[in-house]
Image: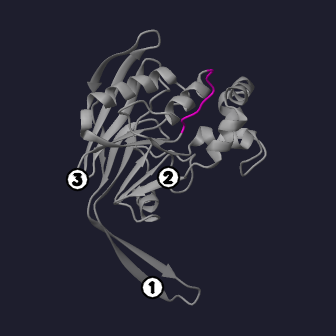
Amino acid sequence: MNKWAILSGIEGNLAAYEAVMADVKRQGDKVEALYILGDLVGPRPETEKLVERVLNPRHGELEPLICKGWWEEQCLILHGLGPTGDVPELMAKYGGDTVEMLWECVSRKTVQWLRSLDFGFFELDCLLIHGSTVGVDEELTPETPPIQMLDRLSRMQANNLFCGRSGLTFEYQMQTGFITTALTTLDKQVSSQTVTVNPRQVIGVGNVGRTPGQATYTLYNPGTNQVEFKTVYYANSKGFQSQHKGKKSKSSV
């Protein structure tokens, strides 16, 4: 079985996307699927050009499967299409200038398209989402407690969870084990249950557009369960320059 190319956090960065697509093309026919796990858009002037580029793959390129991310949610809220009427998190983190830039750089037509995006994808035993099964804003990292990771995986019965919210590349592996829970009622009756935990993992897929000149993404082989992190270096004026294999960062619990 061939590999999946998994991207996240392009954030409107057209040059970074072009660099990654050039690197994916270098893999030849080994890549059979292309996923973009949210944060496709961002407060950048070239965001509309990026969206057009992504929706119109060039000859020989895969058509990407795209799900919602944090920036997409902020766009929907700004246009009155989200769960709330304001963007306090966006204001607190980036300020009013970024709010205005996001409003100006993402058209109403694109926002309507963002509404149609899925929350995530479930393929084979893999869940691919931006944040977690709780929401697009939750960051899973190597420091996330094991019980929290297990909960996020168990909600969808996935063995592999791919996420991009943190922007980090990591493998967080959970080995076979047991969890015993107990419930004590008011009349002091105690009931317990033991649950077997099978080997599972959470994979941070990296970030394409956040760091100028450097993009990270993930290649995954569902047949062998092998994860490979890729780092692509580029320049805005010259485009794709060179690529190097990224190093793995593992956390085992």
Taking the image as shown, residue 59 lies to the left or right of residue 91, namely left
At horizontal 61% and vertical 23% (from top left) the residue drawn is: 44
What number is the disc on residue 212?
Answer: none
Kindly report the distance in space between the C-alpha atoms of the residues bearing marks 3 and 1: 40 Å
Q: Which residue is mark 3?
A: 223
The tag earlier along the polypeptide, 2 or 3, is 2
At horizontal 42% and vertical 10% (from top left) the residue drawn is: 238
Kindly report the distance in space between the C-alpha atoms of the residues bearing marks 2 and 3: 21 Å
Q: Which residues are magenta?
A: 39-45
> Of residues 198 and 156, which is closer to you in this image?
156
Q: Residues within 10 Å of mark 2 (few under 14, many from 20)?
A: many
Q: Which residue is mark 1?
A: 191
Q: Residue furthest front?
A: 59
Contact, CB < 8 Å: mark 1 with mark 2? no
In the rendered image, residue 12 lying in the magenta stretch gets the answer no
Instruction: Count every numbered label the image shows and give the total.
Output: 3
What number is the disc on residue 120?
Answer: 2
Q: Amino acid at mark 2?
A: Gly
Kindly report the distance in space between the C-alpha atoms of the residues bearing marks 1 and 2: 36 Å
Q: Amino acid at mark 3?
A: Gly
Q: Residues within 10 Å of mark 1 (few under 14, many from 20)?
A: few
The tag earlier along the polypeptide, 3 or 1, is 1
Residue 52 coordinates in the image, percent (x, y): 56, 30
